[in-house]
């Protein structure tokens, strides 16, 4: 029997991706930059996402986010679960995802893979690209409110683009979360000093060169007075900072302001409350990547970056990971079908009528 109707794809677990060297923030940033430029040149199809919310109070949801990279002839979808109560309720992670990639010559799938790694790396990569242009390159200290998965990945991204970072201060809702962050991240960055704040946001953030908020809270945790001139702030979660933080910043940069302004994070709230308008936004990140607008212009300006998430970037990073893992011979070939339905010789034995 010819196997031309065989469909198989590469199954890649998170461990396969890690062993293949996919936790590579430079690879993710390169893929993200290429995707942002490709989207502007209409080389990417990016339909609306589909959202299914199961609990309005906790916002537990599963989102389906498709995108097609036309030059690469790859169509992908991220199927992502966001369950904010997971860490406190079950001691497990908030976000988990899988990605399916298909080629668009025949439409057959080529990969079924973990999507949590690429999803979290996308958040870090976008923050990293922003920091490359807007953080002071002599930054020494980085501080976090929120010490979960996004915070950890953000530290990797920031240290990649600003290697001079030598001190990391962290605050979270509970002491044990700060301790876990420090124990996990100090194994990776042995050249950095880590300081737990004892859940005191001010102790962590006040006077830091780079500030990151990555919380599941909906409250103005970061105060404007703690952000010194010259600091760079990456805002990851929902409502996490008082309005004065953005108001005092010299430059506000988004991944896509049109998307950001219709969501629920601080900048979106400010827009809806009439406290922030289109003219207050310095740039979408792609304009800086394309060299149309300059990054930091002085040592004293404060910069505010907010990315709401563009899923075509996730698909682009997942595709880069798939190629690297395939080249490294990682993962398992998984058969989806051996032949077409009616070509199975023993179909008459299987059929139920
Ligand atoms: N912008 C994006 O593209 C993007 C992508 C993924 C996730 N997110 C958001 O990023 C946020 C963090 O995600 P995560 O996966 O790291 O979550 P997580 O559950 O792993 O971590 C959440 C952190 O928030 C802290 N926190 C909660 N309430 C707090 C409070 N009152 N004070 C101080 N700290 C508090 C917790 O201690 C914890 O460290 C979430 O809001 C998530 O929705 C954004």
Image: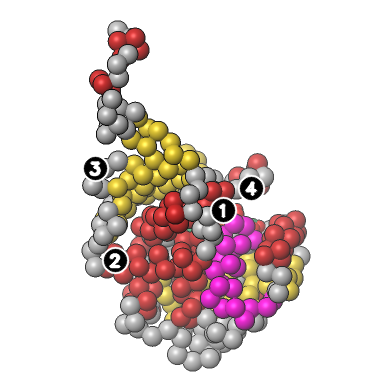
Q: In the picture shown, does residue 150 fall above or below 211?
A: above
**The CB of the residue at mark 4 lies under 8 Å from ligand 1:** yes
Q: What stretch is highlighted in magenta?
A: 147-167
> x, y (%) of residue 20?
53, 55
- Residue holding disc 1: 19
**Residue beneath the point at 56% across and 82% down:** 231
Between circles 3 and 2, the one closer to the viewer is 3
Secondary element at image label 2:
helix
Check the picture and name the quadrant holding the C terminus.
top left
Mark 1 secondary-structure assignment: helix
Q: Distance between the residues labelled 2 and 4?
A: 36 Å
**Image disc number at residue 38:** 2
Is 165 contained in the magenta span? yes
Residue of label 3:
106
**Residue 112, image x and y in percent?**
42, 43
| Contact flag, marks 2 and 4 (Cβ < 8 Å) | no
């Amino acid at each position: 029997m010819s196997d031309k109707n065989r469909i198989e794809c590469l199954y890649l677990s998170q461990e396969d991706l890690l062993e293949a060297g996919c936790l590579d923030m430079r690879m993710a940033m390169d893929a993200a930059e290429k995707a942002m430029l490709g989207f502007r040149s209409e080389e990417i199809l990016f339909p609306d996402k589909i959202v299914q919310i199961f609990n309005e109070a906790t916002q537990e949801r599963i989102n389906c986010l498709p995108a097609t990279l036309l030059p690469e002839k790859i169509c992908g979808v991220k199927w992502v679960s966001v369950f904010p109560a997971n860490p406190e309720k079950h001691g497990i992670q908030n976000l988990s995802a899988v990605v399916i990639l298909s080629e668009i010559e025949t439409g057959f799938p080529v990969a079924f893979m973990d999507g949590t790694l690429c999803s979290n790396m996308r958040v870090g990569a976008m923050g990293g690209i922003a920091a490359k242009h807007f953080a002071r390159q002599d930054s020494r200290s980085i501080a976090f409110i929120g010490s979960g998965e996004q915070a950890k990945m953000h530290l990797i991204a920031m240290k990649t683009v600003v290697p001079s970072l030598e001190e990391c201060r962290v605050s979270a809702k509970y002491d044990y979360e700060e301790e876990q962050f420090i124990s996990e991240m100090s194994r990776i960055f042995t050249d950095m000093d880590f300081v737990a704040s004892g859940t005191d946001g001010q102790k962590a953030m006040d006077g830091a060169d780079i500030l990151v908020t990555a919380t599941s809270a909906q409250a103005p945790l970061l105060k404007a007075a703690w952000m010194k001139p010259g600091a760079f702030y990456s805002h990851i979660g929902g409502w996490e900072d008082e309005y004065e933080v953005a108001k005092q910043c010299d430059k506000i940069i988004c991944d896509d302001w049109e998307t950001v302004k219709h969501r629920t994070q601080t900048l979106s709230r400010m827009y809806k409350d009439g406290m922030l308008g289109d003219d207050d936004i310095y740039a979408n990140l792609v304009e800086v990547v394309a060299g149309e607008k300059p990054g930091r212009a002085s040592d004293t300006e404060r910069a505010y970056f907010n990315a709401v998430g563009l899923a075509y970037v996730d698909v682009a990073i997942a595709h880069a990971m798939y190629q690297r893992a395939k080249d490294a011979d990682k993962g398992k070939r998984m058969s989806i079908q051996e032949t077409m339905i009616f070509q199975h010789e023993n179909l008459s034995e299987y059929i139920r009528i």
